[in-house]
């Protein structure tokens, strides 16, 4: 289509400019993550226990994984998990917090 060879050293930004397309993947991932967390916190108590770390057991060895809830809290401008939880339980506030980012 654009006749770009695989040996050409062209940045992704330049390819997006040539095709006149904006990056949508990160925006799509963020909206899907927020809708999943909002649905989970609002409806499923067992999964909320897992997210909050209320399940007892041994700690895993190695570097801790990326915590989805911290990323959602940062994206929605919430200061803690309890603020995200309160916001997700109120569906109107949750939608407003996630739509304001677009």
Image: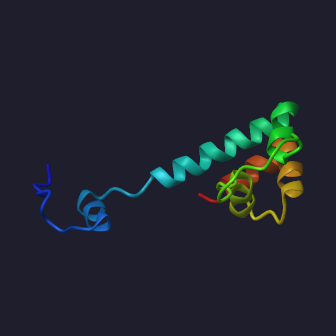
Query: x, y (%) of residue 100?
Result: 68, 58
When asked about the image quadrant of residue 101, the answer is bottom right
Up-down: is 62 above or below 46?
Answer: below
On screen, residue 97 versus residue 2, left or right, reads right
Name which residue lies at 82% across and 42% down. 91
Query: x, y (%) of residue 30?
Result: 59, 51
Query: x, y (%) of residue 74?
Result: 71, 63
Query: x, y (%) of residue 77?
Result: 75, 65
Nearer to me, 55 or 22: 55
Name which residue lies at 69% across and 39% down. 36
Considering the image in quadrants, where does the C terminus appear? Answer: bottom right
Up-down: is 82 above or below 88?
Answer: below
Number of numbered discs on residues: 0
Q: How is the structure coloured here?
A: rainbow
On screen, residue 4 versus residue 61, left or right, reads left
On screen, residue 58 versus residue 33, left or right, reads right
Name which residue lies at 89% across and 50% down. 86
Nearer to me, 77 or 8: 8
């Amino acid at each position: 289509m654009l006749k770009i060879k695989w040996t050409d050293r062209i940045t992704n930004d330049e390819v997006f400019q040539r095709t006149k397309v904006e990056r949508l993947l990160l925006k799509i991932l963020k909206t899907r993550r927020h809708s999943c967390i909002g649905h989970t916190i609002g409806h499923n108590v067992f999964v909320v226990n897992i997210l909050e770390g209320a399940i007892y057991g041994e700690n895993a060895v190695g570097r801790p994984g990326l915590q989805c809830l911290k990323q959602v809290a940062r994206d929605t401008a919430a200061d803690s998990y309890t603020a995200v939880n309160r916001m997700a339980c109120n569906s109107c506030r949750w939608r407003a917090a996630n739509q304001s980012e677009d």
